Image: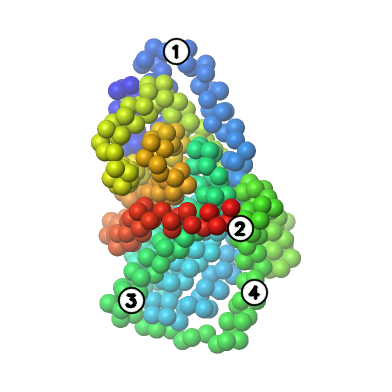
Amino acid sequence: MTTALLLFIVLLLLRVPIAFVLGLTTIIYIIASGNLGLMSTAPQRLYSGLESYGLLAIPLFMLAGELMNSGGITKRLIDFAKTFIGHFRGGLAYVNVVANMLLASIIGSATAQIAMMSRIMVPSMEKEGYSKEFSAATTASAGLLGPIIPPSMLFIIYGVGSGASIGSMFMAGVLPGILLALAFIILIAYTGMKQKWPTQKRATVSLMGTSFIKVIPALLVPIIIIAGILSGAFTPTESAAIACVVALIVGFFFYKELDFKKIPSVMINTAISTATITMLIAMANLFGWMLSFEQVPQTLANWMTSLTENPLVFLLIINIFLLFVGMFMDGIAALIILVPIFTPIIATYGIDPIHFGVIICINLAIGVLTPPVGAGLYIASSLGKVKLEALIKAIWPFLIASLAALAVITYWPDMVLWLPSILK
């Protein structure tokens, strides 16, 4: 086991893709331990890691996001936000956060959202006089809303792994997502006043009305998703399929920017993204199987419960641990490995699994922006054409704001549980 863990650390430091790190570590463990009989079981574990109806929502939500990008829906959402709040001091920075909130209700992935918005918002903010570092930091930080505001891939994977209701997880993410966005907006307002950013001319009432009318078809996608799940008309997985249909209709018939020539590229992009995530899920399941075989979950559980009997202190320890894990491991892989470990433990402390699910997902989402492995940092740095060192320096205030919001969410469970409880 020691050999496998050393290999795991070395491969991570060498920046080998996390899916290969997890798979290679498991294979080396099997060989080093002499349990070659496990090798024949490994393919079954890979397959069983993907054999879940809930995971079907992931490729469908990805397809919906691709259809929205190609169909002009994303552009309308950004224009809508710009028309209504672009005139405030630091208006385009606010637009960045609000547009990410709207897109989060469709995309559900921080890295995908950061990649898409970095291409659009960083050049736009730079033209308006914002520094490139601040523009990239704002875009990357606002991308954290992707896995928090429903629908969320992390919530889907947590629900599948823990047995928690995915619909309840979706509803539980709404208020924390809004709180996180407010934290960013307060930070932007403070920065704007400190640096005395200029204000912009307010849009006319007629322009606001026109923008609102244009965005109504785009807003149909998140509205139908949330309303359908709340009403019980369809499951979260079925809502993903319906979102694809709505995005297709809106792109084809309302905005007329989606045509048959774009469909092959949409399908290819969806297939590549889905293959990347499903491979990661399968390999993480294999790695988790190795940890279970060595009884690592039980050992870790016994150690953590021996530290404290106070649930508040336990949550603090969990947050520190998860933030550390998020610095070195992909969120999806960490979620698949850690959920089976923590699910039995939180029951002994009386912590609600929905509340804990939001806490663990926010922690791992923050890990997207923390060095040395934070994928969101590298994406924003590359697409925004900003030096990584400068971006890390600019993003620290946003990380502090994120941690402040996380503390509120951790120690005020009603913020998370209130909406699922009244909508049951």
Whole-Å distance between the Cαs marked 4 and 1? 61 Å
Q: Residue furthest left?
A: 307
Indicate the secondary structure of the residue bearing disc 1: helix
Image quadrant assignment for residue 391: bottom left
Find numbered disc 4 in the image and state the secondary structure of the residue it sits on.
helix
**In percent of the image, x 43 and y 76: which residue is there?**
91
Q: Nearer the viewer, residue 83 or 401?
A: 401
**What residue would you read off at disc 2?**
226
Q: Which of marks 4 and 2 precedes in the sequence?
A: 4
Could you tell me how far apart the alpha carbons at marks 4 and 3 are, in whole angstroms?
30 Å
Q: Say which residue appears at 58% left-offset and 56% top-offset.
A: 423
Q: Which residue is mark 1?
A: 36
Number of the label disc, if any, that sits on residue 192 = 3
Dot 4 corresponds to which residue?
A: 214
* Amino acid at the residue labelled 2: Ile
Q: Position of residue 17 (x, y in %)?
A: 42, 38
Percent x, y of residue 373: 35, 45
Q: Secondary structure at mark 2?
A: helix
- Give the number of the mark in front: 3 or 2: 2
Q: Earlier in the sequence, mark 4 or mark 1?
A: 1
In the image, which is nearer the foreground, mark 2 or mark 4? 2
Q: Is residue 406 left or right of residue 95?
A: left
